[in-house]
Image (cartoon, rainbow, N blue to C red):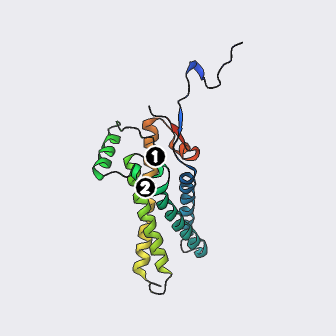
């Protein structure tokens, strides 16, 4: 009697081999950060306790992610995805020409976006903390800087989502699902 593999799809094609890319910490960090940022941004001056709690949570998440960027697994390490500006610009050019190479981990533009988001969010957290200290209490200038950084982060998030959609389309893989499952299609 012949056994048929459950991995064969219609027409005899096999699904692509999958590899584990995003570890649980990176995935939990990503979705927790997104949730906390939305919560902090939505509450703003309206629900100060929730806003401050979300801000402290973001600061803690950022601290843990920065540490993980040095000691975490391969695809979580900064050394794996932080690239020089020339390489990032060349990659963006290749995306525009629909010839960008596929990366198993973060591509150069994605690495640059991670760094930009970490810096913007850290700046937002630092200015938010400073605003509740005696030295800066009531500082309108600091409040404007805090709001500018938060609004800039919104712009970065929009660019990030667009980049994910473009890369998903160009390489025919759902990057949102991979940030949930931790798995991506093996190298082509």
Q: Residues within 10 Å of mark 2 (few under 14, many from 20)?
A: some
In the picture, the quarter occupied by the C terminus is top left
Horizontal arrangement in the rendering, residue 33 relative to residue 107 (left or right): right
Q: Nearer the viewer, residue 85 or 3?
A: 3
- Return the residue found at the far top: 1
How far across and how far down the image is residue 11, in percent?
57, 18
Question: Percent from the top left, x then y, of residue 26?
Answer: 53, 53
**Looking at the image, which residue is at 33% across and 44% down?**
91
As helix, strand or loop, the secondary structure at mark 2 comes to helix
Residue drawn at point x = 34 percent, y = 51 percent: 83
For disc 1, the neighbor class at 10 Å (few under 14, some 14 to 19, many from 20) is some
What number is the disc on residue 164? 1
Q: Residue furthest bottom?
A: 134
Percent x, y for residue 66?
46, 61
With respect to residue 37, does 144 lie above or below?
below
Q: Which residue is mark 2?
A: 114
Residue 176 spot, x, y in % from top left: 53, 45
């Amino acid at each position: 009697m012949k056994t048929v593999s459950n991995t064969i799809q219609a027409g005899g094609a096999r699904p692509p081999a999958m590899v584990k890319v995003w570890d649980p910490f990176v995935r939990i960090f990503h979705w927790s950060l997104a949730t906390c940022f939305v919560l902090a941004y939505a509450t703003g001056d309206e629900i100060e306790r929730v806003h401050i709690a979300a801000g402290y949570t973001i600061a803690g998440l950022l601290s843990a992610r920065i540490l993980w960027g040095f000691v975490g697994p391969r695809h979580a390490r900064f050394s794996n995805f932080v690239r020089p500006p020339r390489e990032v610009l060349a990659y963006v050019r290749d995306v525009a020409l629909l010839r960008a190479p596929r990366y198993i981990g973060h591509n150069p533009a994605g690495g640059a976006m991670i760094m930009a988001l970490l810096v913007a969010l850290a700046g937002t957290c630092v200015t938010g903390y400073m605003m509740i200290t005696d030295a800066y209490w009531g500082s309108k200038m600091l409040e404007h800087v805090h709001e500018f950084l938060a609004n800039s982060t919104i712009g970065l998030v929009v660019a990030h989502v667009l980049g994910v959609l473009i890369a998903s389309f160009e390489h025919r893989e759902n990057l949102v699902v991979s940030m949930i499952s931790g798995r991506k299609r093996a190298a082509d």
